[in-house]
Amino acid sequence: MQMIPKRLPVDIYHPHKANAEEMTKYHSDDYIKFLHSICPDNMSEYSKQIQRFTVGEDCPVFDGLFEFCQLFTGGSVASAVKLNKQQMNIAVNWAGGLHHAKKSEASDFCYINDIILAMLELLKYYQRVLYIDIDIHHGDGVEKAFYTTDQVMTVSFDKYGEYFPGTGDLWDIGAGKGKYYAVNYPLRDGTDDESYEAIFKPVMSKVIKMFQPSAVILQCGSDSLSEDRLGCFNLIIKGHAKCMEFVKSFNLPMLMLGGGGYSIHNVTRCWTYETAVALDTEIPK
């Protein structure tokens, strides 16, 4: 007799593709027009724009580039809308989390900053939104976008020093109205579960107590795991997931996003496990 698996308490949505108008709520019109037009066959016609928008080396041009951007961006924005309408407590878009993209600049495989666009959507309903980044790389694009506002607090735990993107200094704390609303915690090579947890929990407890956010965006880049091809931390999947589980314990509306990850077995196992944790569901080992 075949056992019928119990249905998980999760709804799967197929969001619309984000259009150019939605993307230009943050990104510049000419940058979005460029992404819409560029393809491998016409790159020679856009040599100046390629250089201007820093597309090429770590942000390659490929067939379907703009549609790719539409899909992951649409997922993040639609997730924010679901949270705004209180149709769910936790929304997940593992295709999102591209935290390096700037207003008119692609960076490190990030073309559109879906996080910023989702944040702008959440701010329509929530007075204060907390952004937490546990990718090994600093969330520079998101921090830069909200560096002078007190409505968003950005917190990034990352490798700092001679390491991409070279930002995320302890003393980068925001400016103007946003002073003290940017928090960066630089970490050393080899950071393991125990040391990461000893930092993450007290820092985030204090941040949430003082900032009192109405909603949270958590970027769960898996390149902070051990054996990542580009990373240099020593976290295991359960240690990584403890960060998400701790944030979840505050019972705030939460958008969980993907991000970096350069060892495919790490990425798939990590985000599968964290989906299960979000659902309070055990999965077979």
Image (cartoon, grey):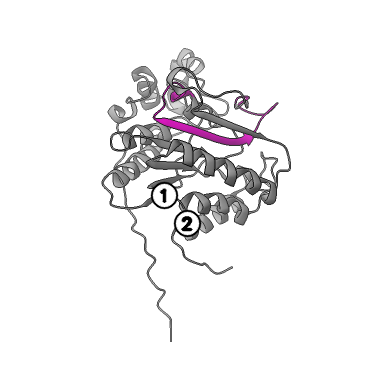
**Does residue 18 lie above or below 83 as drawn?**
above
Tell me, yes or no, whether the highlighted magenta stretch contains residue 155: yes
Q: Residues within 10 Å of mark 1 (few under 14, many from 20)?
A: many
Q: State the mark number for residue 75.
A: none
Residue at the limit of the structure toward the left, as seen here: 85
Q: Which residues are magenta?
A: 144-167
Residue at the limit of the structure toward the top, as seen here: 48
Tell me, yes or no, whether the highlighted magenta stretch contains residue 187: no
Residue 180 makes an appearance in the image: yes
**Does residue 217 lie above or below 138 as drawn?**
below
Residue ID at (63%, 28%): 164
Q: Which residue is mark 1?
A: 92
Marks 1 and 2 in Cβ contact (< 8 Å): yes
Residue ID at (38%, 23%): 27
| Dot placed on the residue nearer the N-terminal end, 1 or 2 | 1
Q: Amino acid at mark 2?
A: Thr
Residue situated in front as seen by the camera: 6 or 155: 155
Q: Position of residue 103 (x, y in %)?
A: 42, 22
Residue situated in front as seen by the camera: 274 or 272: 274
* Image quadrant where one finds the C terminus: bottom right
Q: Amino acid at mark 1?
A: Val
Q: Which residue is mark 2?
A: 275
Cα–Cα span, label 1 and label 2: 8 Å
